[in-house]
Image (tube, helix red, strand yellow):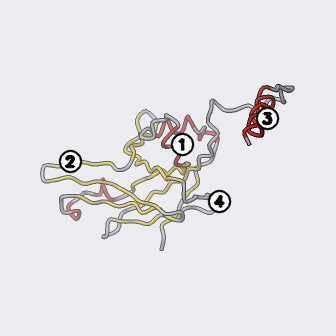
Amino acid sequence: MKKFLSLFAIFSLFLVACEGDQGPPGPPGQDGINVVGQTFEITFDFDDEYSEFVTIPDGIEVLESDIILVYLLESVEDGADVWSPLPQTFYFDDGEVQYNYNHTTFDVNIYLHGRIDLNTLGTAFTDDQTFRMVVVPSDFALDSGVDINSYQAVKTALDLDKKPVMKAQLQK
């Protein structure tokens, strides 16, 4: 048995030490990132429940392992959109309110909650709110080194300028 193991070890060493011709080069990469990002957005008024379900548009596939990043359009300055990641908290003298979300593979629930009476919020917080959502693989969010809190950084890393932003609809 020892003789067999010795011969096997020597034979294995010969196989590992062999070098052949180098194969052809692989396809060029894009700065080490090969991720397909998909983007959609919606503008709506919150209802009396302060929660809206957004249907993910046809043509956008969300896998169980994907995450959806949601950004709130806070303002437009010098023609440039200012996006803030959710959750986003706003503080008042009598409490706070937060935009937050959760998602499945077919919808995104965007909601308001807080330590104040939501019925006292002005329309600036409830009406004509625009949210942009980006679907990315979870390993991109965890391992890419891209600041996912910055829509601009995500947009640049995924080259989203070259892709259309699809319009979403509220679930009825």
Residue at the spot of label 1: 140
Marks 2 and 1, Cα distance to the nearest angstrom?
32 Å
Mark number, residue 7? 3
Residue 48 in the image, given as x and y percentages of width and height: 30, 70
- Label 4 with label 3: CB-CB less than 8 Å: no
Question: Is residue 123 or residue 152 the one in the foreground?
Answer: 152
Q: Is residue 106 left or right of residue 30?
A: left
Tell me the kind of residue under disc 3: Leu
Per the image, the residue denoted by label 2 is 91
Residue drawn at x 56%, y 35% as measured from the top left = 157
Disc number lying in front (2 or 3):
3
Quarter of the figure with residue 129: bottom left
* Mark toward the start of the polypeptide (4 vs 2): 4
What is the distance, in whole Å, between disc 1 and disc 4 at their CAs? Answer: 21 Å
Nearer the camera: disc 4 or disc 3: 3
* Callout 4 amino acid: Gly
Task: Give the mark nearest the N terminus, 1 or 4.
Answer: 4
Question: What SS does tag 3 mark?
Answer: helix
Q: CA distance from mark 4 to mark 3?
A: 58 Å
